[in-house]
Amino acid sequence: MIRPALMIRHQINLGFALVLIMALLTIFAVIEWQIKPNLIEQQKKQITINQKGLRDLLDAKLGQIELLTSTMAQTAAKLPKNEALFKKTFPPILDNHGDPTIAGGGIWPEPNAFEKGVTRRSFFWGRSEQGLEYVDDYNDPEGSGYHTKAWYKAGEGAPADRCAWSEAYIDPFTRTPMVTCTIPIREGGRFAGVATVDMRLEGISDILTRYGEENDGYAFAIDSSGHVVSSPKAALPRGQRAPSLMTVDQMARKLPWLRNTLEAAKDLEDATLVEIKRDGVFGEAAYADLIKHQQTGWVIGLAVPQSRMTAAADSMGLFLMAAIGALLLGVGVVAAVIARNLLHKVQQTTHQIRELVDGETTEALHVGTINEVGELRQAVNAYGDKLKSLLQHLEDVKDELVQSEKLSSLGSLVSGIAHELNTPIGNAKMASTAITDANRSFSRKLEQNITRRDLDEFMADVDEGAQIIERNMTRASELIGAFKQLAVDQASSHRREFDLEALMNEVSLSLRPTLQRSPYQLETNIPKAVTLDSFPGSLSQVLINLINNALLHAFAGRNEGCISIRASTDTEGQSVTLQVADDGNGIPVDRQKSIFDPFYTTRLGQGGSGLGLHITFNLVTGILGGHIEVQGAPDQGSCFIVTIPLIAPTLTESS
């Protein structure tokens, strides 16, 4: 017999190796030429979105300073012109609960506006280690005064509710970099001076540094005069940071790889994305997104490494290569084992067929190359008719198996659909069978003398079975109706009389989809017939905010928990107290005094805006005319206590 040059098992092994190599090369090509460019473009868009988030964060911080300055300007316009009163009133306002980003500020009247014949009568406080200290230097008759200062003159034509932001400068009193917010004081429609708040740039720098780190990069800011408001601390070691404000050119000399980005920032009007060939911080290519903050004229930059943009594609490529390679390898091993066994059996069958035919001749098939198939063809030439019959039989069996598989799939689908309804319907069926058996047993007893006990037992069995059927049919009805969308009533934003229990039911109904997707429970205990003449829209928003706050923060790291809402009225019937409590992680005592502050959140960049509880506080203490407090300790849960009058004050009284 002629020996084969290449056996089928060798061809299978070679083919498998080629398929594995081609699959891996295809995955690599698709990722490099299709997926990775798309991901980079998506990441570029995400950087822009992140920049807008940074701008919003900066707007929030600057908005706090703007609101504080506006408050000082309005207060100065309304207060009697009394020196002692000014010195007593403004330091608590300016201190803003010890906000370290506020370096100082004051009230700067026009000549003769505070006191006739007095041209310099300003009130300035600067922050030191001991707190706010009053400084009278600007009132020195021998000094340069303050009316000619750029920050003062900027307020003359400025709007009464928007900051005129100064350029970055080094404060002569505190020796720290800062910017000044100026808002005019207007009395009777005329310009009467300005109110200012000095904000340390260190606070802005901290925000930018933290935001850059959260995005795996670094951030920086440049003001309209070309001074660096915040430099990338990761790029400048502490020993190389300038003691005063750097210019863009100075920063470019220290960081030459950032020069093109800084040049693009000089003439920026809106936003742009700059590619950095090799970033000195990341040691690789990077992208810097530049956006102009219109309110201050600052240019804010956010730089991220290019590897961050391609990390997902690289990870996906390695995963796909490993997964498909392992799959193909497993399939190859199984196929090799099956092929080895199959070929061995083919050789045995060939030998047996040869023995059976024992010389009979049939129409010959082309044998071709002498390998396992060639040997099989030689056997088929001798046993063709029987083999054709066997193949036809196998074809019929194959059709039967295909049909059987279809029926099996259909059965699985029907089983899956019926699974949810099986339990209540099965329970109802067992209950009906039990009632039938009890009826038959009772019918047999009727043929004899029955006792009162027999009748009571029969009635009890029938009643119990009927209740089981009713409960399970109700459950089945609820399951069938589970696909209908729940219509939630929206609470009115107008004042009216309403029942507290009905309002709580509406709130529970609106939160039901959220609660059903979580492992946490909501329990309510509201007395009946508690009627309020108030604002149901505001009260429902308060309750929803407190419940959502518990769902977001209280149960981190826990798979179960309970939120309870209880209400009670005072003995005089004048107010109602709502307690929204949870058995979660609790709130540390040192944080409880800050949770109602705006933008205070422990989940920055994770869905927490820091405004939910601040809005809740304003609604309770403002529109609803009540007060709110929080109690609790770590690992002992927390409880928000809201007390509001049953008859809300009018808006003018509560504002």
Image (spheres, rainbow, N blue to C red):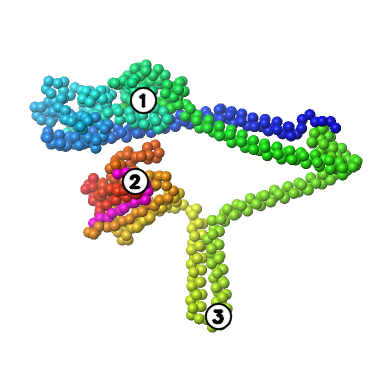
Left of 406 or right of it: where is 143? left
Q: Which label lies toward us, 2 or 3?
A: 2
Residue type (three-letter) at the residue carrying disc 2: Pro
Left of 89 or right of it: where is 454? right
Instruction: Name the N-terminal-most of marks 1 and 3.
Output: 1
Q: Residue at x 85, y 44 (%)?
A: 385
As drawn, 510 above or below 599: below
Residue type (three-letter) at the residue carrying disc 3: Leu
Q: Residue at x 21, y 25 (%)?
A: 173
Instruction: Name the N-terminal-most of marks 2 and 1.
Output: 1
The residue indicated by pointer 1 is 233
Instruction: Name the N-terminal-most of marks 2 and 3.
Output: 3
Q: Residue at x 48, y 80 (%)?
A: 452
Q: Give the number of callouts.
A: 3
The residue indicated by pointer 2 is 634
The spot of residue 595 in percent (x, y) is 31, 42
The spot of residue 567 in percent (x, y) is 31, 56
Measured Cα–Cα span from mark 2 to mark 1: 35 Å
Residue type (three-letter) at the residue carrying disc 1: Lys
Q: Which label lies toward us, 2 or 1?
A: 2
The residue stretch that appears in magenta: 574-589
For disc 2, the neighbor class at 10 Å (few under 14, some 14 to 19, many from 20) is few
Q: Which label lies toward us, 1 or 3?
A: 1
The residue indicated by pointer 3 is 446
Looking at the image, the residue that sits furthest to the bottom is 449
For disc 3, the neighbor class at 10 Å (few under 14, some 14 to 19, many from 20) is few
